[in-house]
Image: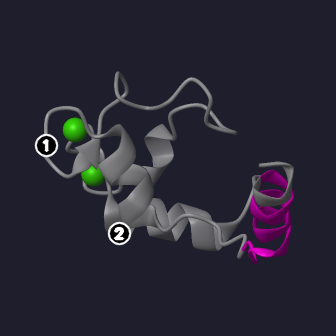
Amino acid sequence: MKRTLIAAGFALLTTPVYAQPPSAEAIIADNDRNGDKGLSKEEWSPQAPIGYPEDADTNKDNRIDAAELQALIDKGPPQ
Ligand SMILES: [Ca+2]
Ligand SMILES: [Ca+2]
């Protein structure tokens, strides 16, 4: 029994973790509640590192789609 637990713990420790930043598509899929493939102000996570980026909504349809979010990510954090 003890052996099994130790083996399991060791497996966890040695499992490589690839810390990849989530893609724009993944962020949208996680937060898009109405399935329109974009994030509205209401859907924008309060845990997001920045507030709802109105300026990133370049086509002014009141939601951030994957392309707009990717452009924002590519731009990097505000200076
Ligand atoms: Ca949505
Ligand atoms: Ca938009």
User: Does residue 26 sit above or below 34 in this rendering?
Assistant: below
In the picture of the structure, the residue carrying the numbered disc 2 is 67
Report the amino acid beneath label 1.
Gly
Secondary structure predominantly adopted by residues drawn in magenta: helix
Residue 65 sits above or below residue 33 on the image: below
Residue 42 is left or right of residue 50, and the answer is: left
16 with respect to 69 (left or right): right
Residue ID at (35%, 29%): 43
Any magenta on residue 18? Answer: no
Give the extent of the magenta segment. 5-17
Residue assigned mark 1: 35
Residue 55, label in figure:
none
Image position, residue 71 (x, y; %): 49, 69
- How many discs appear? 2
Residue 30 seen in render: yes
Residue 40 in the image, given as x and y percentages of width and height:
30, 33
For the C terminus, which image quadrant?
A: bottom right
Residue located 35% across and 56% down the image = 58
Q: Residue furthest front?
A: 1
